[in-house]
Image (cartoon, rainbow, N blue to C red):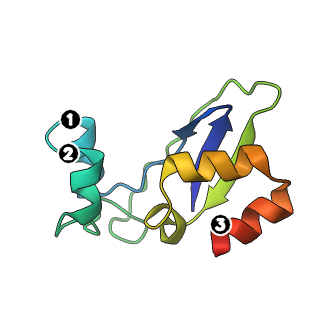
Amino acid sequence: MCGEIVCCPSIQSLTFWNLWVEEMVRSGDITPEEARHHPWRNRITRGLGMNPNVTVAINIYDWQPGDTLVLCSDGLTRHVNDDEIAALVMNYLPREAVAHLIE
């Protein structure tokens, strides 16, 4: 599960999947577009059950009036880009936005 915050008119990812390609994007080695099609796009660098010691990431965010939180799986973010998600969330009621995102 990931979190995306839509702050009109932009969108910001709140969570990371701990994927190898995400680390490469953050370090500037590849672009987000290259990451979407990279052969290692599904290779994780850490996850529950891989090690008996778990490091939990806790973040604090400054919410603003009008911000919208979108919780979704990578099944959505793989097929719908951030701009499309933000546009749907800003222009539709929540139930309608969800219906459009599922399509």
- Look at mark 1 in the image and give the residue it sits on: 27
The answer to whether residue 15 of the structure is visible from this angle is yes
In three-dimensional space, the C-alpha distance between marks 2 and 1, rounded to whole angstroms, equals: 5 Å
The answer to whether residue 58 of the structure is visible from this angle is no
Disc 2 residue type? Met
Residues at marks 1 and 3 touching, judged by CB atoms closer than 8 Å:
no
Q: Which mark is residue 101?
A: 3
- Pointer 2 local density, CA inside 10 Å: few below 14, some 14–19, many at least 20: some
With 93 as the anchor, is 41 left or right in this view? left
- Pointer 3 local density, CA inside 10 Å: few below 14, some 14–19, many at least 20: some
Disc 1 residue type? Ser
- Look at mark 2 in the image and give the residue it sits on: 24
Residues at marks 2 and 3 touching, judged by CB atoms closer than 8 Å:
no
With 25 as the anchor, is 68 left or right in this view? right
User: Residue 94: percent from the left, percent from the top?
Assistant: 83, 56
Label 2 residue SS:
helix
With 38 as the anchor, is 89 left or right in this view? right
User: Residue 86: percent from the left, percent from the top?
Assistant: 62, 45
Q: Nearer the viewer, residue 90 or 26?
A: 90
Label 1 residue SS:
loop
